[in-house]
Image (cartoon, rainbow, N blue to C red):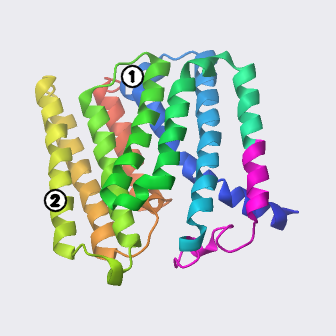
């Protein structure tokens, strides 16, 4: 039974649900997470679960469109559709089942009603991505993917009634674009790629400078430079992240999964340490 279910669980990409933690960003970085009531937090979890189920349908659609190319990829060839462990009919039934569960969520949880438009836009964006956008160029495809992450941020903003700042929106968008773009570049066989290594490094440097510039301007524009500990600590973390992404995509190169950047290793521990320290300093939970 377990062996039978594994391909269905894999194609739903439960591991990728970690990407939906971005929905929590507005309520976390506004400091409201420390005051949230239990009932509201449960509502937030319901929104995240419903959105995660929708992303599973998107992943199935993506695998359906890409199964021919995936079968030639050194890593993606192990996916259930590409490896023929599941048939198109079976994943069609699975998608229908997930959509039924999604409908049940909408009927029973009123909190989801305000997110219908955002969920639909996310679904539509991914349909266009699979049918057209990813075939145009890695840049256009990465913009579409980054827009999907911005929508996650917007969902969290609507839920928490928190106005998204330019800083948070742009940092999430650019960081997602950076990882998505280089993942797609590394997925292109060298013989078929017309983008050389120098171009990759220039693009990486340009986007990294934009991210760092936006970060520094955030502290300047909100008069947060007085938080010297916070500025220095965050700058160190930013440089570490930029180095880590550079090493992962440019130095190591080759087909890889961006989720490995935040896997259960020293990098994730450093991120957790940064997050706890940032949160404590920023919102005064410990003395500076």
Q: Residue 171: x percent and y percent?
A: 28, 40
Q: Residue furthest bottom?
A: 191
Q: Is residue 38 rendered to the left or right of residue 267?
A: right
Residue 268 at least partly seen: no
Residue in front for this viewpoint, 39 or 136:
136
Q: Residue furthest right?
A: 1
Magenta span includes 81: yes
Counting from the top left corner in percent of width and height, residue 50 is at: 64, 34
- Image point (66%, 58%), residue name: 11
Which circle's residue, 1 or 2, is located before the other in the chain? 1
Q: Residue visible at 73% across and 30% down?
A: 103
Do we see residue 147 in this rendering? yes
Neighbor class of circle 1 (other Cα within 10 Å; few <14, some 14-19, many 20+) is some
Does residue 38 lie above or below 123 as drawn? above
- Circle on res. 224: none
Q: Position of residue 30 (x, y in %)?
A: 36, 22
In the depicted view, which residue is nearer to us: 36 or 159? 159
Q: Is residue 13 left or right of residue 227?
A: right
Nearest the viewer among 238 and 203 is 203
Instruction: Give the Cα distance between marks 1 and 2.
Output: 32 Å
Residue named by callout 1: 31
Region in magenta: 70-97
Residue 65 sits in quarter: bottom right
Looking at the image, residue 96 lies above or below residue 247: above
Q: Secondary structure at mark 2?
A: helix
Determine the secondary structure under disc 1: loop
Q: Are marks 1 and 2 in contact (CB under 8 Å)?
A: no
Mark 2 highlights which residue?
A: 205
């Amino acid at each position: 039974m377990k062996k039978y279910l594994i391909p269905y669980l894999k194609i739903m990409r439960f591991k990728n649900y970690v990407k939906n933690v971005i929905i929590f960003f507005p309520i976390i970085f506004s400091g409201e997470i420390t005051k949230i009531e239990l009932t509201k937090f449960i509502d937030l979890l319901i929104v995240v679960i419903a959105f995660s189920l929708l992303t599973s349908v998107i992943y199935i659609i993506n695998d359906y469109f890409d199964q021919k190319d995936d079968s030639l990829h050194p890593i993606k060839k192990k996916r259930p559709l590409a490896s023929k462990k599941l048939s198109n009919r079976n994943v069609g039934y699975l998608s229908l089942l997930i959509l039924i569960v999604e409908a049940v969520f909408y009927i029973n949880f009123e909190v989801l009603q305000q997110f219908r438009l955002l969920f639909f836009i996310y679904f539509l964006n991914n349909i266009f991505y699979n049918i057209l956008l990813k075939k145009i160029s890695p840049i256009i495809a990465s913009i579409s993917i980054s827009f999907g992450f911005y929508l996650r941020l917007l969902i969290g903003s609507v839920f928490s009634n928190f106005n998204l700042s330019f800083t948070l929106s742009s940092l999430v968008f650019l960081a997602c674009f950076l990882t998505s773009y280089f993942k797609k570049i590394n997925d292109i066989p060298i013989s078929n790629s017309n983008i050389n290594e120098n171009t990759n490094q220039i693009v990486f440097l340009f986007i990294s400078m934009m991210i760092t510039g936006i970060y520094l301007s955030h502290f300047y524009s909100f008069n947060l430079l007085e938080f010297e500990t916070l500025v220095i600590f965050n700058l160190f973390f930013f440089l570490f992240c930029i180095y880590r992404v550079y090493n992962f995509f440019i130095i190591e190169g080759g087909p890889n999964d961006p989720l490995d950047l935040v896997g259960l290793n020293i990098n994730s521990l450093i991120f957790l340490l940064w997050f706890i320290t940032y949160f404590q300093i920023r919102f005064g939970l410990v003395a500076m």
